[in-house]
Amino acid sequence: MDEIDTEFKLKEIDLEAEYDANAAEAEAAYQKKLAELFLTPGVTFDQVTIEKLQADGKAYADELFRSKNNPQKR
C-alpha cells in the first residue's frame, strides 16, 4: 500500500512540476510580448493597442488554464 501511495505522490509532484514549467513558459512569452510593446518607439496606447493587450492577457490566462487542466499537453 505504501508503494502505491508513493507512486501516486511522485506522479502528483511530476504533474505539479510540469504545470510550473508550462506556467513559466507562458509567463515568459507574455512578458516578452509586453516588453516588445512597451519598448516599441512611438507606440501609442489607442483602442487597437489596448485591445491587443487585452487579447494577449486573455491568451496568457487561457494557456495557464489549459496547462493546469492538462499539464502534459504543451
Image (tube, grey):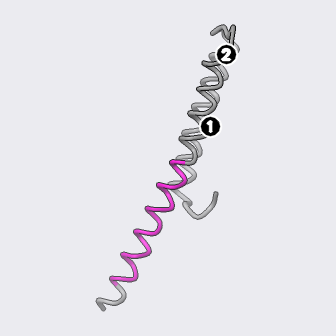
| Residue 70 on image: x %, y % | 56, 60
Overall secondary structure of the magenta section: helix
Q: Quadrant of residue 51?
A: top right
The residue to which callout 1 is attached is: 59
Q: Residues within 10 Å of mark 1 (few under 14, many from 20)?
A: some
Judged from the image, the secondary structure of the residue bearing numbered disc 1 is helix
Callout count: 2
| Residue 53 on image: x %, y % | 61, 23
- Residue at 61 percent across and 39 percent down: it is 29
Label 2, label 1: how far apart the Cα atoms are: 15 Å
* Label 2 vs 1, first from the N-terminus: 2
- Residue at 52 percent across and 57 percent down: it is 69
As drawn, is 43 to the left or to the right of 66?
A: right
Query: Which kind of residue does numbered mark 2 sit on?
Result: Thr
| Residue 45 on image: x %, y % | 63, 9
As drawn, is 62 to the left or to the right of 13?
A: right
- Residue at 29 percent across and 89 percent down: it is 2
Figure check: 9 above or below 42 = below
Check residue 1 for magenta coloring: no
Query: Which kind of residue does numbered mark 1 sit on?
Result: Ala
Q: Quadrant of residue 13?
A: bottom left
- Residue at 57 percent across and 51 percent down: it is 66
Figure check: 42 above or below 14 = above
Q: Which mark is residue 49?
A: 2
Residue numbers of the magenta segment: 5-24
As drawn, is 39 to the left or to the right of 14?
A: right
Work out which quarter of the rendered image holds the C terminus and state it. bottom right
Residue lying furthest left: 2
